Amino acid sequence: MYAAASGDFFDFESTWRAVQPEDIVTLIYTSGTTGNPKGVEMTHANLLFEGYAIDEVLGIRFGDRVTSFLPSAHIADRMTGLYLQEMFGTQVTAVADARTIAAALPDVRPTVWGAVPRVWEKLKAGIEFTVARETDEMKRQALAWAMSVAGKRANALLAGESMSDQLVAEWAKADELVLSKLRERLGFGELRWALSGAAPIPKETLAFFAGIGIPIAEIWGMSELSCVATASHPRDGRLGTVGKLLPGLQGKIAEDGEYLVRGPLVMKGYRKEPAKTAEAIDSDGWLHTGDVFDIDSDGYLRVVDRKKELIINAAGKNMSPANIENTILAACPMVGVMMAIGDGRTYNTALLVFDADSLGPYAAQRGLDASPAALAADPEVIARIAAGVAEGNAKLSRVEQIKRFRILPTLWEPGGDEITLTMKLKRRRIAAKYSAEIEELYASELRPQVYEPAAVPSTQPA
């Protein structure tokens, strides 16, 4: 435009031909959970390889319908909402407020869709609420029957068992009569595949959605790897894993468990930070991801946690805070964010923060003050959350369980002191800001505003 306005000739043909595959196309800044954000330099080659690798594993078609609802600072939204559209001609619907995504889905009717675990958890809670509140007796009975059949399918998946011929036939009938209509109502009637990423998702949640006919593939990636680096199609997925490394990449596990990746998805470097680039990418081209992984004999990968975020308790036991947090959050729909604490301690505790979207409806139904401070002191709310923590604890080993918790009378906003724009915990800052509250969790006697879970027996070994 400037060239045209000034009368200069702009040679578009020679300009685009001068662009090289290794030229930088964009910067994605890291979340800054452990320090200042770093600018990840992505090249045209990075993004093209990413798009075609995803297509090879999952399959992307011209006209596929997707939504853009995550922050644009998130590489996942940049990839699905922009680059895949440019490469494959997908149809993108922007949802300005992520809190309204569930309401938007029936209008969009996505054919491919992905979300973070917390969004899947909210959709699950919404489905359960809808089933429980159905007023028409015949519809309620039909939903209850279909959901019980879906539950049997979910239980078979969790147990690693094949469905019996009887269950296959029963599920097909439930799908034809009820579950297919439920998916249509949700907006997933034409969904070909679904993804979950950015954090661990409980197996029970994956099994629940598979039970109602929405199999979800868990994926893993990072900005330094141009977005997704591991995936499997939902039909080939293995519950509790993030799939296999995308074709064309190499991976290996270092002696300390850290996963290293080499190949066309590795970033060019951190913008104007050669020392940090050299720390991340070694002389042999391996990107040190900072994530600890397990791998099975078939090449399926399981994320343990961030190497720098593992909890090592006073007895030397290594634990994944993300696994603990996501297990508890799955049982506590009123809680939006939590941080597990236990490094160097004799037991684990947690700080809990309300889910902003849940406060208003809950308070309105009961005629309560909807402020976080008021609800954090409400006996019924405390009891519900204590029961949820206990329910989550029952799915954790004894050493992982949360022994005490406190509900903070505030909300944590994306981009604030506690969480990043991409909803990652700033653990060091939280530990410093709430040091007094954390110390009270470990007092010899139970302090005011410090609570213990309701008594529920564990189903897991110590």
Image (cartoon, rainbow, N blue to C red):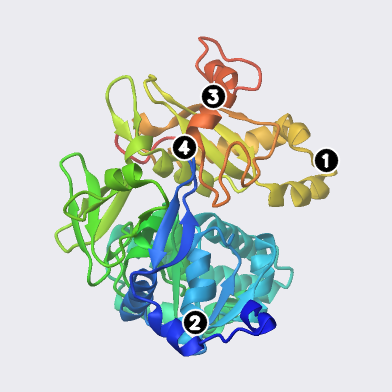
**Type of amino acid at the residue the image marks with label 3:** Ala
* 297 in relation to 385, above or below: below
Residue furthest out toward the front:
7
Q: Residues within 10 Å of mark 2 (few under 14, many from 20)?
A: few
Mark positioned earlier in the residue sequence (2 or 3): 2
Closest to the observer: 174 or 81? 81
Q: Determine whether, in the image, residue 196 is placed left or right of residue 362.
A: left
Q: Is residue 133 left or right of residue 290?
A: right
Please tell me the numbered disc located at residue 35.
4
**Mark 2, mark 3: which one is toward the viewer?**
2
Q: Give the mark nearer the N terminus: 2 vs 1.
A: 2
The amino acid beneath tag 1 is: Leu
Amino acid type, residue under disc 4 in the picture: Gly
Residue 448's tag is none
* Residue type, numbered disc 2: Glu
The residues bearing labels 1 and 3 have C-alpha atoms spaced at a distance of 32 Å
Residue 415 is situated, as x and y percent measured from the top left of the image, at 61, 45
Q: What element carries label 3?
A: helix
The answer to whether residue 151 is left or right of residue 447 is left
Looking at the image, can residue 380 be seen?
yes
Judged from the image, the secondary structure of the residue bearing numbered disc 2 is helix
Which mark is in front, 2 or 1? 2
For marks 3 and 4 on the same chain, the one whose residue lies earlier in the sequence: 4
